[in-house]
Amino acid sequence: MKHATVIESNDLFGGFNWPSIARLSDGRLIVVCSGFRLGHICPFGKAVAMYSSDEGESWSAPVPVLGTPLDDRDAGVAVCGEKVLVTSFNNSRAFQRRIAARDWSGKERALIEAYLDCVSDEEEDRFLGSSCVLSSDGGKTFGKPVRVPVMAPHGPCVLKDGSLFYLGRAFAVENENGGFPNNLLEVCTSRDWKTWSPPAEIPMPREEGTLFCEPHAVALPDGRIIAGLRAQRKDGFSIFTAHSSDGGKTFGPWRDLAFHGSPPHFFVHSSGAVILSYGYRKPPYGQRARVSYDGGESWSEEIVLRDDGLDWDLGYPATAECADGSLITVYYQKRAGARHAGIYQTKWELPQRGYEK
């Protein structure tokens, strides 16, 4: 395995978190994430894009592509031909003020409060929620933010007919978390990548004391869709998966994969293998992956991509395929002594068949 840096900075607004990765129609790789952050929760984040023309050996400087007056967080990306969609979500000023009072002091807190004072009620009403921006020229330029009914860290997936399928949580503004999504799983679709169908509810698993959130889905070669959910319990995380055979109208049954790690990201390799990437938020902290050769019915033994994380504040890995068939996984993590988290990558090889449990 080969590790490398995508972006890191010790500047005041040098935090980069929650990435996604895809290959563009011209062969370049694109990584999107939330960038130019003061901290894990702050009102300054913007969804940024970085590009590589040499299979991840080097990356361009981060360019903002989705920026609202609020905190634009986890960035997802979907690509089909010249169309490139980048997604993000944010949270309310009230939530930001509560976190500032809890986590910040001195000049940093004063800076956050001063900025929030400059965001108007009209701006919050206009931009609070989940958003996307569309490029129709292969990721060179992007349009204005458009509201989306649902949100998920890595955004929607592309179906065989070129339409978008977005499995996410409904965005609720008025709740105890001040703007985080509520416990409702929904699907919306888009054929033109500009307008979205009304969201349709998908029943999620129910388990006492467990929060289900941060879904991701991908279309499989056989036409089915596999979906995954982060299952958050007091003693850690796991991933629940389910399949749909009717284009995403229904899923089920949900199955607990019963290993630590979340949230899920699925990627279908050119061989048909499905790559599941996830963060590992207990010692040894880091990034992990598993491979399925039967559409997610069974999974390989765990593949340790990184185990040198400093603490739980890392993860959200996403995977793409290199030109030679190898894999590249991006994620956020923090180096010892660094002021902020950065975006890093690991290149690795697809294991041979027979690696399954």
Image (cartoon, rainbow, N blue to C red):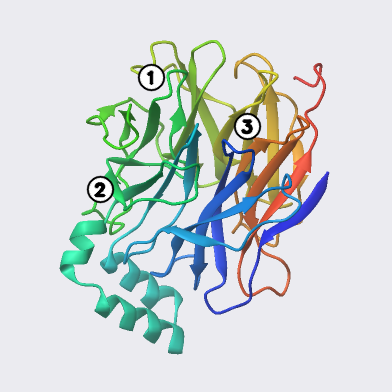
Quarter of image, res 271? top right
| SS at mark 2 in the image | loop
Q: Are marks 1 and 2 in contact (CB under 8 Å)?
A: no
What is the C-alpha distance between the residues marked 1 and 3?
Answer: 19 Å
Residue that badge 1 annotates: 248
Q: Are marks 2 and 3 in contact (CB under 8 Å)?
A: no
| SS at mark 1 in the image | loop
Q: Determine the residue located farthest toward the left in the rendered image.
A: 122
Q: Position of residue 187 (x, y in %)?
A: 33, 29
Q: Residues within 10 Å of mark 1 (few under 14, many from 20)?
A: many
Residue at 68%, 48% (x, y): give it: 53
Residue that badge 3 annotates: 276
Q: Measured along the vertical axis of the image, is residue 271 above or below residue 71? A: above
Residue that badge 2 annotates: 172
Q: Measured along the vertical axis of the image, is residue 323 above or below residue 90? A: above
Please, what is the three-letter code of the amino acid marked with disc 2? Ala
Please, what is the three-letter code of the amino acid marked with disc 1? Gly
Residue at 49%, 12% (x, y): give it: 223
Please, what is the three-letter code of the amino acid marked with disc 3? Leu
Q: Are marks 1 and 3 in contact (CB under 8 Å)?
A: no
